[in-house]
Image (cartoon, grey):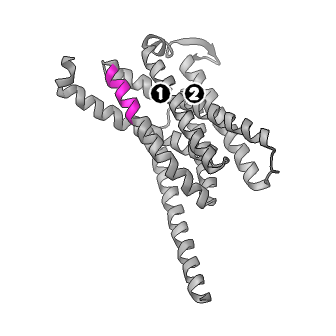
């Protein structure tokens, strides 16, 4: 346990935790969108179960370090480009986000009928499964990076646990905000499409710096905040004029 008193270890823990939290922004957006289709009590329970399972799977992935390192080895070659298991996972995850985002946008615009009780239960299970699957997709890059940044499995596990705690704390308020302001859901779905394209590009070997993506998301979110504030101000003025 001598590593506990090593300042370099604590520095790597801090750096790795911040990185995991930043990379978790994508996940928070996705979780907030998919749980918004459930009732408040069910949405909270789905978040708890989904993130708990996702945390377990992340720890399991960390333990399987040798397998993760092997993910970057080429599995096959297509059109002159080698593809590893990491590339395949990123491609599948990106396509999943594109399909999911497009489907949610379609339902948001066209509308849908109310389902029966068994359909709600199935939707609850589907939401949990989607949280787990997409978290595993998002975790591949961050865990592989963690392997290169830290030498101790304890440091990596601690960083993942802290990041997941922050993700859980943030997903609730974000989901509530999206529920109160439906226009922000379309913006969040657009983020999903953007993230999906970035994952597909990474899987094909075209890395898009995440700074560009986060700047675009932050700028769009800031514009939406101004729209929400303006709408709230107009609503208060209308209420005062009627009273």
Q: Could you say where residue 237 lies in the image, as x and y percent from the top left?
A: 55, 83
SS at mark 1 in the image: helix
**Badge 1 local density, few (<14 within 10 Å), some, or many (20+)?**
some
- Point 75% across, 55% down: residue: 109
In the rendered image, the quadrant that contains the N terminus is top left
Q: Are marks 1 and 2 in contact (CB under 8 Å)?
A: yes
Residue named by callout 2: 90
- Point 59% across, 35% down: residue: 131
Where does the magenta region start and end?
154-162
For residue 227, which numbered disc appears in the image?
none
Question: Would residue 10 be visible to someone looking at this image?
Answer: yes
Along the line of sight, which residue is nearer the eye, 215 or 77?
Answer: 215
SS at mark 2 in the image: helix
In the rendered image, the quadrant that contains the C terminus is bottom right
- Picture layout, residue 47 above or below residue 89: below
Residue named by callout 1: 141
Q: For this view, does 171 lie left or right of residue 126?
A: left
Q: Could you say where residue 219 lies in the image, as x and y percent from the top left?
A: 48, 56
Question: Would residue 206 be visible to someone looking at this image?
Answer: no
């Amino acid at each position: 346990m001598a590593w506990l008193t090593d300042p370099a270890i604590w520095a790597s823990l801090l750096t790795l935790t911040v990185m995991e939290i930043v990379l978790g922004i994508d996940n928070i957006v996705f979780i907030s969108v998919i749980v918004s289709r459930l009732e408040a009590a069910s949405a909270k329970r789905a978040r708890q179960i989904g993130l708990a399972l996702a945390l377990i799977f992340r720890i399991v992935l960390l333990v399987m370090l040798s397998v993760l390192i092997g993910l970057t080895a080429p599995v096959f070659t297509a059109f002159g480009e080698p593809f590893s298991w990491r590339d395949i996972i990123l491609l599948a995850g990106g396509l999943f986000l594109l399909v999911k985002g497009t489907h949610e946008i379609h339902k948001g615009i066209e509308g849908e009928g109310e389902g029966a009780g068994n359909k709600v239960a199935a939707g609850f299970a589907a939401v949990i499964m989607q949280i787990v699957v997409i978290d595993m997709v998002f975790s591949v890059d961050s865990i592989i990076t963690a392997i290169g940044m830290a030498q101790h499995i304890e440091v990596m596990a601690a960083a993942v646990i802290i990041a997941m705690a922050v993700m859980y704390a943030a997903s609730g308020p974000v989901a509530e905000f999206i529920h109160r302001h439906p226009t922000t859901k379309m913006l969040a779905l657009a983020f999903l499409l953007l993230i999906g394209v970035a994952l597909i590009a990474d899987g094909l070997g075209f890395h898009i710096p995440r700074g560009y993506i986060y700047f675009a998301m932050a700028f769009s979110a800031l514009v939406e905040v101004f729209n929400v504030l303006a709408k709230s101000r107009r609503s208060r003025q209308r209420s005062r004029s009627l009273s």
